[in-house]
Amino acid sequence: MRTFLAIIKNIYERTVPRLSMFILLTAFTLASMVLAVHLTDVQQVRGHIVLVTDKSAGVLPYNSKDFDIVVSAVKPPVSALVEKKYDAYVTIGKDGDYQIETLRSDDYKNMVDTMLRNPDAALKDRKNAREVGSNMIGFMMMFLLMEVFANLFAFADDKEQGQLRRITVAPVSFSAYLAAHCIFCLSMFLPEYMLLVLLKFWGFNIGFTLLQYAGLILVMGFFGISFALLLNTLISKPDNASMLGRSIIVLSSMLAGTFYLFSKGNIVLDTVIKILPQKQLMDFVEYLERGEAWHHSFSIVYVIAFSMVLFIISCACLQRKYIKRV
């Protein structure tokens, strides 16, 4: 325990000169989380519809949680559709049929017609729409994983400058040394978690409970630490390891659909995407959102097992490279 406390104290002291970089990375992550909450609210409304009629809005039966419906006695100009101020104009014919004018696709036109005829109808893409929880995890995942490479700066510097070899021959626990770096990395996620606490306190819908977010962040953090530790172990230059790792994180996160549902149609690409830990974690998050998580627990087990394999390989390489050669 003494070794662990001494090392983690040393890491925090070495963080001070790099404080501006950590603040910038954290700010990007926090901004992405706020954006996720905002975009989820925007996505809840599939369009702004103008119902052109001389009847009072109070006597019309239309009420939909998916569309924002405005009643107007005068039809707005077509330019409002072009400017995307509105998505569709609806007029009622003498026979009671709806005449829908929109610049969007026929599928969207049919969706509006379905909603007008039955406001409680299950629209075909409603079940695929992400809620705030999955959006939050998706938007913050890539930034958190990239942040891990910055958080492991002390380990990377120790390895490059030869300090790691001296640490391995010293009468200290190497496990405590690694544990200190891991705990430091996880502790740097506290600002993101505190933002979730504040959003919850201010009454925002954040999707999951704070305990669920803590577990998901721990899983993301463990995967990021394992991956970053492996690259820093195998690649001698920290800058090269960081650049390669962040490039892989960005590409794999995009393919996994963390920001948006990636359009796929290639069998080979689909297979590659399915084995990505980010994709499996996003699948689990969506199952959790629908209350089906424990029926699909393989996804989260896969991510944890994948991370464990990377971590074990990293430790084995470090032991062979440093400890056994002493």
Image: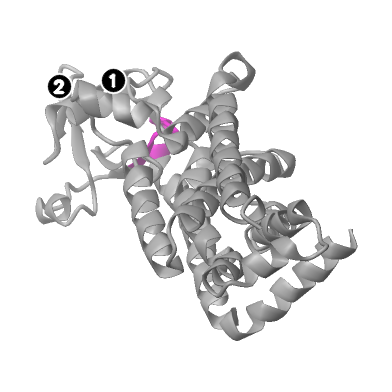
Q: Position of residue 143 (x, y in %)?
A: 47, 57
What residue sits 56% from the left and 66% below the top? 159
Q: Is residue 68 magenta?
A: yes
**Residue 198 appearing in the image:** no
The numbered mark at residue 326 is none
Q: Position of residue 27 (x, y in %)?
A: 52, 70
Amino acid carrying mark 2 in the image: Lys
Q: Nearer the viewer, residue 170 or 2?
A: 170
Image quadrant of residue 154? bottom right
Image quadrant of residue 258? top left
Decide: is 314 above or below 8.
Answer: above
Q: Nearer the viewer, residue 324 or 120?
A: 324
Query: Which residue in the structure is indicated by mark 1?
Result: 114
Image quadrant of residue 243? bottom left
Colouring style: one colour
Quadrant location, the C terminus: bottom right
Please state which of the two labelled residues, at mark 2 or mark 1, is closer to the viewer: 1
Amino acid carrying mark 1 in the image: Thr
Decide which of tag 2 and tag 1 comes sooner along the chain. 2
The numbered mark at residue 94 is 2
* 18 with respect to 279 (left or right): right
Quadrant location, the N terminus: bottom right
Q: Position of residue 275 (x, y in %)?
A: 40, 28
| Magenta part of the chain | 57-69
Decide: is 250 above or below 57.
Answer: below
Decide: is 206 above or below 300.
Answer: below
Q: Position of residue 36 (x, y in %)?
A: 47, 51
Q: How many marks?
A: 2
Question: What is the CA distance from the residue labelled 2 to the residue labelled 1?
Answer: 19 Å
